[in-house]
Image (cartoon, helix red, strand yellow):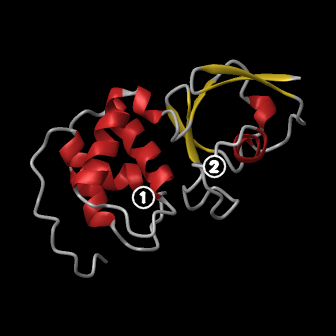
Amino acid sequence: MITLSVNGQPRQLKVPDEMPLLWVLRDELDLKGTKFGCGVAQCGACTVHIDGEPVRACITPVGGIGDGKVVTIEGIAGNRQGRAIQEAWLELDVIQCGYCQAGQIMTATALLTQNPTPDDAAIDVAMEGNLCRCATYKRIRAAIKSASGQPVDDTRNRGTEA
C-alpha cells in the first residue's frame, strides 16, 4: 500500500512501486489533466509538482515519492502563482489545441514561485523542456510576464508564432 499526498489530500493506493506517477494520477485517481506525451520526459506534457518542483510524471516511479506532496493541474489554483498563471493564460488566449497546456502551466508556476519577475531569457530557459506543437511560445512568455505583473508585448496578433 502506498500513501500519497495529491492536491492536499492523502490517497492510499495498491499499486506497484515502479508504476509511473502519470498512470497513478490518470488511471487510479482519475485526474486526467496531466497528459501523456512522449513517455520519456522530453515533451513536458506530464509535468506535475512534487514539493513545489516540476517533475515529469511519466518517468517518476510512484514508490520513490515517499512523503512528497504532489500537485497536479487540478490543484494548481491553490497556489497564488498558479492562479495568476491560469488567469493570464485565459486573458492572453495562449491555448490553441491545449494538449501541452497543463505541463506548460505547471512549469510556469514553478518558475514564478522561484523567480517572481523573470526576464525573457529566464522564461525561455525554464520553459525549454515543454514543447508546444502549436508553437504558442510568444504567448506563453507573455502570459508568464503578465502573471508576474510585468508589462507584456502585444500578443493579439494571431499570426505564425514560430
Q: Which x, y percent locates residue 160?
A: 27, 81
Q: Judge whether residue 121 can be spotted in this image.
A: no
Residue under label 1, please give it: 128
Residue 57 placement, left or right of 19: left
Task: Out of 116 and 93, give the one closest to the viewer.
Answer: 93
Relative height, residue 20 to residue 140 (above, below): above
Labels in figure, total: 2
Relative height, residue 108 to residue 38 (above, below): above
The residue lying at 37 percent from left, 36 percent from top is: 82
Q: Is mark 1 on a helix, strand or loop?
A: loop
Quadrant (top left, top right, bottom left, bottom right) of the C terminus? bottom left
Among the 4 quarters of the image, the one containing residue 152: bottom left
Residue under label 2, please give it: 32
Task: Out of 149 and 129, give the one closest to the viewer.
Answer: 149
The residue lying at 69 percent from left, 59 percent from top is: 40
The residue lying at 37 percent from left, 72 percent from top is: 135
Q: Which x, y percent locates residue 133?
A: 46, 73
Task: Out of 42 and 31, give the one closest to the viewer.
Answer: 31
Residue 118 placement, left or right of 133: left
Among the 4 quarters of the image, the one containing residue 64: top right
Could you tell which of marks 2 and 1 lies nearer the N-terminus?
2
Q: Which x, y percent locates residue 123?
A: 30, 50
Quadrant (top left, top right, bottom left, bottom right) of the N terminus? top right
Marks 2 and 1 sit apart, C-alpha to C-alpha, by: 24 Å
Tag nearer the camera, 2 or 1: 2
Among the 4 quarters of the image, the one containing residue 108: top left
At label 2, the amino acid type is: Lys
Q: Judge whether residue 50 can be spotted in this image.
A: yes
**Residue at the limit of the structure toward the bottom, as seen here:** 160
Q: How crowded is mark 2: few (under 14 residues within 10 Å), some or many (20 or more)?
A: some
